[in-house]
Amino acid sequence: MQSHDVAHASAVSAPLDASSRSAQGAAARGAPAGAPAGEGAPPLDPRLSANLKFDIPAGVVVFLVALPLCLGIALASGAPLLSGIIAGIVGGLVIPLVSRAALSVSGPAAGLAAIVVAGIGTLKSLEAFALAVVIGGALQLALGLLRAGAISHFFPSSVIKGMLAAIGVLLILKQFPHAIGFDQDNFASESFQTEGGNTFTVVVQAVQSLEWGAFLLSAVSLVLLVAWEKSRLAKISWLPAPLVAVLVATLGNELFKVALPFLALEQKHLVSLPTGGAQGLVDTLRLPDWSAVARPEVWVLGVTLAIVASLETLLNLEAVDRIDPWRRKSPPNRELVAQGIGNMLSGLAGGLPVTSVIVRSSANVNAGARTRVSAIVHGALLLLAVVFAGALLSHIPLACLATILLVTGYKLAKPKLFAEMYKLGLSHFIPFVVTIVAIVLTDLLKGIAIGLAVGVFFVLKANMSRVFDVIHEGARVTIRFNKEAYFFTQGKLVALFDRLPRDVHVVVDTQAASYIDHDVVELIRRFQQSAPERNINVEVRGL
């Protein structure tokens, strides 16, 4: 790793990182600091103090969203609830100190829940699983030092945009039931299949079992979130709309308890934290069992976690950079180093594996965050909440948090995005749509793999077009190669050779092609050898 990519590990308080300096330079020249065309993002102030009024409120909003997600992912993973909180704390307090990703927020990921459940079941020990997390983190650290982060550059933009839109669709489908009081499905679930059905059956069941108190609180929250951004109140940088919505919804439910008890939400519809005080929480920790280091299955799980968590992190990082108003570029190798250190510490403390998480990161962007301070604030609040504020936070309705995620989902999957992708042509639009459908119906990594396969198909199709031209001039046929010829052009070439008439002179001209695959060369040579049987004379140029 180059020195500038690893230096200043704890420089969150430094005046400006490289990406911010670039943005500030743009602002000084009179252009919006890295803003995408037409969006007019304000100049990014280089002073840490100037951004606190944006980052602290955004950190509070991310904390409120992350808290039930951490608990829900731990529940879905078959791990102690505190394991999810520990992962969230590490993702907030440790990773931003090493990372150079301005707006990415890390924590436990729903996409890893299935691996965690299977891993704990295989190892039959939470302590052995914690050791596997430590091993996975060490391997991630090694990947970062070996500069393996470049893998993210091999994913087409249509697939990355499809991933963002799919997360938006998932948030709408998954959080709508919670927004109207149907909390039987896990709050952090991203899986299409659910207990006794699937995502769509849960939506239908939710409508049939509508909780009017939750519905009213969600409706008020939604009106606040939409109207706030269009009013002058949006200029109050230290008071973002999601935070106002949480306060109003919480007070509204307390008012229901006094004035309209039949509308008041039960505790199962509110945020729930582990109880027992600081000592009780410490007693639930499951620290690594170092005696399990010789077990092969521990290493297999560690390698699996390292690969899947690294891939998910790199894809999320690329996606977050695309929705950053200042279009800052996060160094992927540095991020792998940060994630590796984070997973090692999370495993050492008995926490779940950590990745960059698109849901929390999107909420961070939508809440107006500007620097990594917002992620640190969210981590600090998670730590304080689990120790001191459990009783206070247990009054927050899940319906309100679900509404915040609904609005985030809409912003990620706006109809305008679909129209823009369609205008780019089917070679972009089809992989985009396939990625969305595949992620919604399977999971994040499987969906991306399917979308990538479709994207590669269109790349191959484009490369196969006009690889060569065929020019007929009486008894002379010229096959002129226009560009690189890879192995997948063999089919068209064989078909052409078979169609050639007898008694002609064929010129195979490859001089304009910068690369001819060995398989294609062998095919041309074989044709040259067999052509005399049909009285065809073959002249080859440029091989």
Image (cartoon, grey):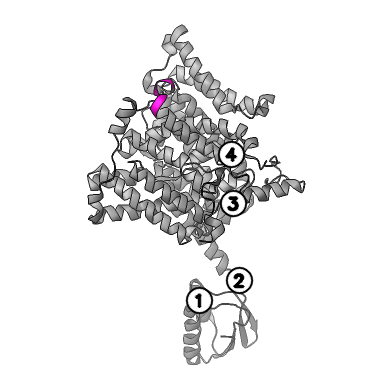
Q: CA distance from mark 4 to mark 1?
A: 45 Å
Counting residues from the start of the chain, the first of labels 2 and 4 encountered is: 4
- Mark 1: amino acid: Ala
Residue 103: x and y in percent read: 55, 42
Q: Answer yes or no: is residue 22 visible.
A: yes
Counting residues from the start of the chain, the first of labels 1 and 2 encountered is: 2
Q: Residue furthest top?
A: 259
Q: CA distance from mark 3 to mark 1?
A: 46 Å
Density class for disc 1 (Cα within 10 Å; few <14, some 14-19, many ≥20) is few
Q: Are marks 2 and 4 in contact (CB under 8 Å)?
A: no
Image depth: mark 2 or mark 4 in front = 4
Q: CA distance from mark 1 to mark 2?
A: 15 Å
* Range shown magenta: 387-392
Counting residues from the start of the chain, the first of labels 3 and 1 encountered is: 3
Q: CA distance from mark 3 to mark 2?
A: 36 Å
Report which quarter residue 55 is drawn in.
top right
Q: Which residue is mark 3?
A: 329
Q: Are marks 3 and 1 in contact (CB under 8 Å)?
A: no
Q: Which residue is mark 2?
A: 466
Q: CA distance from mark 3 to mark 4?
A: 24 Å
Counting residues from the start of the chain, the first of labels 3 and 2 encountered is: 3
Q: Residue at x 31, y 28 (%)?
A: 279
Q: Residue at x 47, y 30 (%)?
A: 176
Q: Which residue is mark 1?
A: 495
